Image (cartoon, coloured by chain):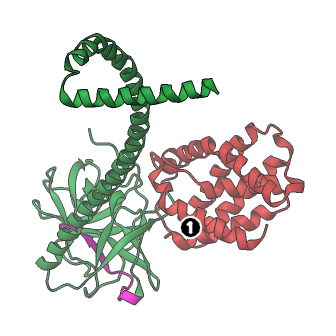
Amino acid sequence: MSLYFVIPFLALLAIFQSTAAPQIRIVGGSLNLLLLSVMSWEQIEARGEGYVWAFIGGVFLDLIGGGPFGASILGLLAATFVANRLGGGLFRDRLLLPLVTAVAGTFAYNGVYLILLRIFGVPINPVNALVQVVLPSALLNMLASPIVARLMLALHRRVKPAGAVWQ
Amino acid sequence: MNRERSRTWLVLVLAAVAVILLLLHEGGQLQPIENVVNTVLGPIERAASGVFGGLGNLFGAVRDLNELRTRNAELETENQDLLTEIARLRGLEGENGVLRQLLNFTQENPTYKFQTAAVIGRDPSPYLRYVTINAGSREGLQPGMPVVTAGSTLVGRVADVGLRSSKVQLLNDLSSAVNVRLQTSNVTGLAVGQQDGSLLAQYLPLTAEIAENDIALTSGLGGNLPRNLVVGQVVGIEKKDFDVSQSAQLRPATDYERLDVVLVITNFEVVGPAMDATPEATPTPTPVP
């Protein structure tokens, strides 16, 4: 897909994360549409384009946020890798795949992000983070994942009508 | 030919009778006959009027119904517009209230220079507590500048500065640490952000008598923040016999989730380092019953 579309699209998703997503919270966890979109795209496209999306999306998140620059990029790349592996044959069920991907990807993204925060000296308690942030985020992402997956599939069919299938 | 002539005569005779009747009516001679006729025709006329009048009302009702529907739709649209306008005005009223409070704060602190800024975004990470404001180096902002809101309440400090926007680290961010003094007990400590968004005042002297509802103010120690800015209020005390100090749970003085407009103090001169050292990770605090 053309970068002329991808860049503004991911920028909008990043802005959503900084404006609307903080309003949608369970305990400390929040919905991450950018993460879900990137992982879905990787599973649909299956040619590594998801990694490019992860990089660009991570750049926008790190520019907007106050954390160490690169943390979101690495977290999204890790989640995209997990999505790539899961979509490679472990789950063929189209209903189950987005759900499992959302949970696994959330853990991967937050795991990498937390490690980097600790490296950069943020005094974060991993147990608290798991209970208060990661698990609620995984739940929210899992609930939204089927919708996001269908939307990304529809987008893919619109952009590339010939090859829109799940991995 | 005869038939034609007969018809002509008939017409002429009838016309003549009509003229005669007209003259008699004008003269009043036909009144008794007219009264009799009206007496007979009256009830019939009334009954017919009732029947045809109902039909007329029915048609009128259908016509009125359409008009009423149109008018109802117009009124609903107008009502919706008015509701929207009311909501907008209420929002302005709230904003006006906040700005008035900020104005009062600036007037009460004439020695400081302030830059007003609106909060335009929040950190997308759930672990970090930063907000983005729409003022940057173009407005004279620099890292380390204190950020306050109404009621002399400290909100945080400017962390990163761009040309037109800046990131503000809130007090309840995990990496934030502010020297505070409890107003009543007059003891000093370090207020640090907690993962749940609250504040914890650490390193308070073990022998100090700390009361709930005591107000935590900036102490000014370290020289990187003005004194006597409100930080929070004590809502719980943690004290263990084997500790060398005690801690106090603080409720932030403002709701960081609802920040809209803030003031950046632009002429406060930092004496010490711009940012306090990042505190070490604290164990999960025990909830105070």
- Please state the horizontal and vertical placement of residue A157, each as a whole percent of the image: 81, 54
Say left or right for A98 vs B228: right
Q: Quadrant of residue B183?
A: bottom left
- Please state the horizontal and vertical placement of residue A140, each as a whole percent of the image: 56, 44
Q: Quadrant of residue B255?
A: bottom left
The residue positioned 25% from the left and 47% from the top of the image is: B241
Q: Give the camera-side residue of B4 and B264.
A: B4
Against A5, is B64 above or below? above
Say left or right for A93 vs A114: right
- Please state the horizontal and vertical placement of residue B215, each as a whole percent of the image: 16, 59
Question: Mark 1: which amino acid?
Answer: Ile
| Residues rendered magenta in the picture | B138-152
Q: Give the camera-side residue of B159 and B202.
A: B159
Q: Which chain is green?
A: B
- Please state the horizontal and vertical placement of residue B260, each as a whole percent of the image: 33, 65
B125 falls in the magenta region: no
Residue B165 visible, this angle = yes
Residue B199 visible, this angle = no
Q: Which chain is red?
A: A
The residue positioned 44% from the left and 83% from the top of the image is: B164
Against A106, is A6 above or below? below
Q: Give the camera-side residue of B286 and B35.
A: B35
- Residue identified by numbered label 1: A119
Q: Mark 1 lies on which chain?
A: A
- Which quadrant would the N terminus of chain B be assigned to in this image? top right
Say left or right for B174 vs B154: right
Say left or right for A157 vs A16: right
